[in-house]
Amino acid sequence: MLKIISANVNGIRSAYKKGFYEYIAASGADIVCVQELKAQEADLSDDMKNPHGMYGYWHCAEKRGYSGVAVYS
């Protein structure tokens, strides 16, 4: 069975400080959809780009601090 989760993180860096990385691991999800990144790809750590061996597909907002989305698979 394929498991997909979606999360509005209201800032990916803040979410990681609050345990989002651990949440992804515990979820057992095959695909994780993330909204409201509020960061540019260059600002993110490798764990934020590719958590737990997943591959991240990013579309960040053109203007810094604005929303963006990512899909991990």
Image (spheres, rainbow, N blue to C red):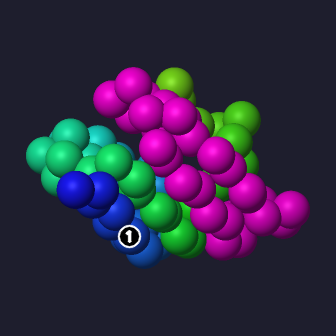
Left or right? Give the position of 10 relative to 43. Answer: left
Left or right? Give the position of 72 relative to 51. Answer: right
Q: Is residue 9 visible?
A: yes
Task: Residue at 66% x, 71% y: name it.
Answer: 67
Task: Residue at 33% x, 65% y: name it.
Answer: 5
Task: Residue at 39% x, 70% y: name it.
Answer: 6
Asked where in the image residue 54 lies, by quadrant, the reply is top left
Q: Position of residue 23 (x, y in %)?
A: 20, 51
Residue holding disc 1: 7
Q: Amino acid at mark 1?
A: Ala
Asked where in the image residue 56 lies, by quadrant, the reply is top right
Q: Is residue 23 visible?
A: no
Q: Does residue 42 sit above or below 72 in this rendering? A: above
Which quarter of the image is occupied by the N terminus?
A: bottom left
Q: Position of residue 12 (x, y in %)?
A: 47, 55
Left or right? Give the position of 46 relative to 25. Answer: right
Tell which residue pokes out farthest to the left in this image: 26
Q: Position of residue 33 (x, y in %)?
A: 47, 62
Q: Position of residue 72 (x, y in %)?
A: 48, 47
Tell which residue pokes out farthest to the front in this image: 1
Q: Along the line of sight, which residue is nearer the eye, 1 or 15?
A: 1
Asked where in the image residue 2 lies, by quadrant, the reply is bottom left
Q: Along the line of sight, which residue is nearer the eye, 2 or 47?
A: 2
Left or right? Give the position of 1 relative to 40. Answer: left
Q: Which residues are magenta?
A: 47-73
Instruction: Say few, some or many: other residues with alpha carbon within 10 Å of mark 1 (under 14 / 14 to 19 / 20 or more).
Output: few
* Residue 56 is covered by the magenta coloring: yes
Tell which residue pokes out farthest to the right in this image: 62
* Residue 71 is covered by the magenta coloring: yes
